[in-house]
Image (spheres, rainbow, N blue to C red):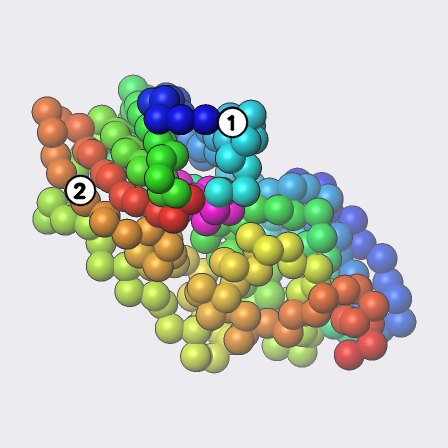
Amino acid sequence: MDLSSRVVGDLLIVSVNEPRIDASVAIQFKDRMREETDAITGHVALDLSQVDFIDSSGLGAIVAAMKQLGSEHRLDLCCLNENVDKVFRLTRMDTVFRIFASVDDALAA
Amino acid sequence: MGTHAKTPIQFELQGTPHAVRAALLQLREETYANGEALANMGSLEIVLGEVLNNVVEHALAGRVDGLIVVRCLHESSEWRVIVRDNGIHMPNGKLPPGVAPDVDTTRENLPEGGFGWSLVRMLARDLHYERSADWNVLSFTMDG
């Protein structure tokens, strides 16, 4: 599970450099998110621009990643493609996360 | 053009999450090759992913000889899909109700699972399940 991150201001932007977050990688995703966000001081934005498929296990792993940050650190999402956005809307998880169209929008929020 | 018979897309896979991923990628390739890449493929992939993952996690849990056979026919702007597996039957012999987990709750109580069947029921119609000769047979229809 290839994740990379960079700090911009007080925001940690974590990019998912994979086309899919599905049942076969959900646990690795959660573990890698814990590693990437180990030393955070502010909020996190998850850049999903390279992800074109997510299943309910992947969705659960993103929820788990949000929970493991602790309540003082927010997890925002950005750059959801159509199929990923559809899963968030149908499960109403779009009401749980702040979702931005671009990394810039997440930075400006 | 004309009334030539459509050829269904068929594939077999073993009961593992990696086999499910490979099968969905194969489905993408085959539908693209048939010029059907835009025929509601995103929703079909979501539904098939949930159905297949459920088979792997429940019907075929702990099995080394688990087998899943998928048949997708695109015809008259519809996908007609049949998924068969040689696993144990559905609890009570019925499909799960697929009630969506409540997300209007505290952060600590947010659900991390239980979305699969609700997604299937929201996106697919004509869901039918039966047990046939020790196989599970699930069929459904989607716009395509």
Q: At x 45% / y 64%, what residue is drawn?
A: A90
Q: Residues within 10 Å of mark 2 (few under 14, many from 20)?
A: some
Q: Is residue A76 magenta?
A: no
Residue B101 percent location from the top left of the image: 36, 67
Amino acid type at circle 1 is Asn
Q: At x 85% / y 57%, what residue is drawn?
A: A6
Disc number placed over residue B129 in the picture, else none:
2
Left or right of residue A34, residue B43 in this image = left
The one of B137 and A11 positioned closer to us in this rendering = B137
Residue A23 percent location from the top left of the image: 48, 43
Confirm whether residue B38 shows in the render: yes
Image quadrant where one finds the C terminus of chain B: top left
* Depicted A15 relative to depicted B79: above or below: below
* Mark 1 or mark 2: whose residue is earlier in sequence: 1
The segment highlighted magenta reads B40-48
Residue B97 percent location from the top left of the image: 22, 59
Q: At x 52% / y 63%, what residue is drawn?
A: A88
Amino acid type at circle 2 is Tyr
Task: Please say if the residues under marks 1 and 2 sit with CB atoms less than 8 Å apart.
Answer: no
Q: Chain of mark 1?
A: B
The answer to which quarter of the image holds residue B53 is top left
Residue B59 percent location from the top left of the image: 25, 37
Left or right of residue B107, residue B7 in this image = left
Q: Secondary structure at mark 2?
A: strand
Q: Chain of mark 2?
A: B
Q: Give how far apart the Cα atoms at labels 1 and 2 are.
A: 29 Å
The answer to which quarter of the image holds residue B64 is top left
Q: Residues within 10 Å of mark 1 (few under 14, many from 20)?
A: few
Q: Give the residue pinned by disc 1.
A: B34
The answer to which quarter of the image holds residue A20 is top right
